[in-house]
Every structure is written in C-alpha cells, then in structure tokens.
C-alpha cells in the first residue's frame, strides 16, 4: 500500500479553527432546503466516498458494494502488518548472524597460525621457567577460544541458513498482501471516479423519488421546521437584556463558535483512521492537535456553560428553593467563584506571557507553538468573569425586586 507522508501545516490548523466555525454558524442559520444537494453529495464523496456513504446519502444501495472492498483493504493491511513483523524479526536475525560470521570467521581462519606459533614458543622454552608457564597458558587460552569461536560460527551459520528462507517468505508475503490491498484500493478509487461523474444524475433520481413521496416528506419538513423554531426559542431564552444581555450574547456565541470544533475532530480522526488502517501511515499531528483543541474548547466554553447553568453542582436543596433564596445564596457564594476565576486569569496570564516570550513549542515532531493555547486560558477566564458579573447583577436585581415586593 502507498504511504501518506502529509503533515498538517500550522497555518492550516489555525485558519481551520477560525474559519470553519464561522462557516458552520452561517450554514446553521440558513433555511434548510428540502431535498438533496449535489454539493453535499460531492462533499460526502470526498470525505466518506471510500465507504460509499455518498450513495447511501442518495438512497442508492449500490453503496453497500464499497463496504466489502473496504473490509478487504483492512484485512490485507492486517495480514501485511503481521508479515512485516515476521520480516523484521527475520531480517534482524539475518543481520545479527551475518555480523557475527563476519567478525568470527577471520579469527577462526587465523587461529591455526597463532596456535602453531605458540606451540613453537612452548617447545623452545626452558622446562619450569616463567616463559614456559606463560606460553602454556596462552596456548590453552588460544585453543579454548578457537573451539568456542568454531562452535559459535557453526551456530550462527546454521541460524543464517534457517533465517534467510524465513526472510524471503515474509518479504514475499508482505509484498503479496500489499499488492492485494493496493488493488482493492484502486477498485474503490475507480468506483469513486465513476461516481464523481454520475452524482448529478443520482441526485436528480433521488429528487424524483422524493417528489413521488411528497406527502410524507411535506409532513416531515413541517415537523423539522417546528423543531427548529422550538430549538431557537430554547437557545435564546436564557439571554438577558441590556448590558447583561450583551455579555450573555458574547458567552453564547463564543460557546457556539468552539462547539463546531467538535466537527473538525470528526474529520481529523476520520483521516487518522484511514491513514493508519488503510495506508499504514499513522500521523504525528492528529491526536496532539485535537486534544489541544479540546482543551481550548473546554476553557472558552466555560462562560456558555455558566450562562446556561450547565456547570456541575450539587443542587439537592438548591433546586427547590425560590428565586429569591437562590439569588441570596448565589450572592454569598459568588466570592468563591470570582476567587477561582481570578486565579485562573492571573495564572493563565503568567503562563501565556512566558510561552510567548520563550516561543514554547510542543515536544513532538509537529512542533506547534503553545502560546495560543496558553492565551486561551486567559480568554476563557475573562469570559467566565464577565458572565459571573452578569449573573451577579441579575442576582442583585432579583433580591432588590423581591424585597420591594415584600
């Protein structure tokens, strides 16, 4: 199988985080047209065509044909990975045995001359002399070393003779599965290229089928419109008026903005799965980029969670209290909230300034700059404090009106 060496450029990562949510927010606010879209069909062809999802989107069951071919690719890659491990083990064994043979064979070949010279030295040495004793020890050591090297050389030559066929078999198996997997991939690529030409016609056919079932579709479309209106009323019901409403809207749209980053994660991890399991090319940037992105999302969405009262809390008693009592308790406990949020703001500011000054980057080969992520701590804390001020103002207003009513 061909490999994928693509590494996401940093500017594409950051521009995607900025531009995609704006595009998604715009698309979410447009009036949905009932029916099928050629543009969406091509989008699905690019992102999920390898699974035939574009045909399934158009209610064309021929899309199921893609699935067994895709599963064949996964199977061939799994077998290829096993063959690669066997090839690696056999190659290491062959390489190790060859190094030993290359190093020991010259020693064995030259040992006879060395032993003959030691024996000649021993023969002329005086009986009982120190020179004779030393010559005897050298001769014994040389003979023992020769026997050991011969055994070692024989063993490694036997291992080398046994490992070479294993290496050839593993290499052949890896090439076979790689070729089969690549052939299956080419089948899918050919089907996708054909569908790229057929999609306009398939969309027209799907639209014709939709028109034939117009009655039920009209009822469905009407229900969808009602759901959309209910969701819109629910989404904006917690946004106040006046200057606190301005803060609410900032919190709302910042939360909505980062919420669409989750869609980016779907595309990124989809690419990672294909790169890892189809092309045997795991990336170095998807996981790091996504967990950093989710960290920023968690921080920036804190104000939205505070506005919608979505933060986790123990409200066994609180939930049953009157608005006046809730407001009083919230006022008393708000000091802890501002201490917490203020600590995050100050600490985040220190972290962000340090990362900006030193130009801190990640430890991976991707080496993305860390200072934008550190500044997300500051932004998230600032938004959280603003939302806390708006909540504080509303609690004071609730207490004031309740006291006046009494």
Image (cartoon, rainbow, N blue to C red):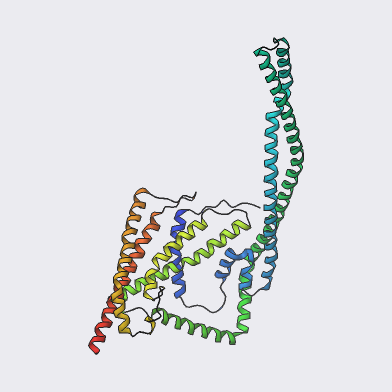
The front one of 206 and 216 is: 216
**Most extreme residue toward the front, as rendered?**
128
The front one of 87 and 258 is: 87
Q: Quadrant of residue 351?
A: bottom left
Q: In this view, does 170 lie above or below 404?
A: above
x, y percent for residue 54: 61, 69
**Most extreme residue toward the left, as rendered?**
404
Task: Kindly tell me whether residue 324 is visible in this rendering.
Answer: yes
The front one of 158 and 62 is: 158
Q: Which residue is drawn at 61% across and 73% down?
A: 57
The front one of 326 and 299 is: 326
x, y percent for residue 183: 70, 56
Instruction: State how many labels appear.
Output: 0
Task: Kindly tell me whether residue 252 is visible in this rendering.
Answer: no
Q: Which residue is drawn at 64% across and 52% down?
A: 2
Q: Which residue is drawn at 62% across and 54% down?
A: 280
**Most extreme residue toward the bottom, as rendered?**
406
Q: In which quarter of the image is residue 257?
A: bottom left
């Amino acid at each position: 199988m061909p490999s994928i060496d693509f590494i996401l450029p940093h500017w594409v990562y950051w521009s995607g985080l900025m531009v995609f949510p704006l595009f998604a927010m715009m698309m979410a606010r447009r009036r949905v047209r009932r029916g099928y879209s050629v543009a969406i069909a091509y989008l699905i062809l690019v992102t999920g065509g390898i699974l035939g999802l574009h045909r399934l989107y158009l209610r064309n069951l021929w899309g199921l044909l893609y699935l067994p071919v895709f599963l064949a690719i996964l199977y061939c890659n799994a077998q290829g990975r096993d063959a690669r491990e066997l090839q690696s083990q056999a190659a290491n064994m062959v390489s190790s045995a060859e190094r030993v043979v290359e190093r020991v064979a010259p020693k064995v070949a030259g040992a006879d001359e060395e032993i003959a010279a030691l024996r000649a030295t021993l023969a002329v040495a005086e009986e009982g002399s120190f020179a004779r004793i030393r010559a005897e020890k050298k001769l014994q050591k040389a003979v023992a070393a020769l026997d050991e090297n011969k055994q070692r050389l024989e063993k490694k030559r036997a291992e080398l003779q046994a490992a070479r066929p294993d290496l050839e078999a593993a290499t052949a198996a890896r090439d076979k599965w790689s070729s089969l997997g690549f052939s299956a991939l080419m089948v899918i690529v050919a089907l996708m290229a054909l569908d790229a030409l057929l999609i306009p016609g398939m969309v027209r056919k799907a639209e014709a089928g939709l028109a034939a079932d117009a009655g039920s579709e009209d009822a469905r479309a009407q229900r969808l419109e009602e759901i959309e209106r209910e969701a819109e009323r629910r989404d904006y019901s917690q946004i106040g008026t006046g200057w606190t409403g301005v803060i609410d809207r900032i919190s709302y749209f910042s939360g909505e903005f980062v919420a669409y980053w989750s869609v980016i994660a779907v595309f990124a991890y989809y690419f990672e799965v294909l790169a890892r399991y189809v092309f045997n090319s795991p990336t170095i940037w998807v996981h790091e980029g996504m967990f950093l992105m989710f960290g920023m999302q968690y921080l920036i969405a804190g104000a939205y969670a505070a506005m919608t009262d979505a933060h986790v809390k123990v409200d066994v008693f609180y939930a049953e209290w009157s608005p006046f009592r809730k407001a009083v308790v919230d006022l008393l406990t708000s000091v802890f909230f501002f201490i917490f949020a203020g600590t995050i703001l100050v600490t985040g500011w220190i972290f962000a300034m340090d990362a900006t000054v030193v130009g801190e980057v990640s430890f991976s080969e991707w080496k993305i700059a860390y200072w934008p992520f550190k500044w997300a701590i500051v932004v998230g804390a600032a938004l959280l404090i603003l939302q806390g001020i708006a909540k504080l103002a509303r609690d004071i207003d609730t207490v004031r009106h309740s006291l006046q009513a009494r």
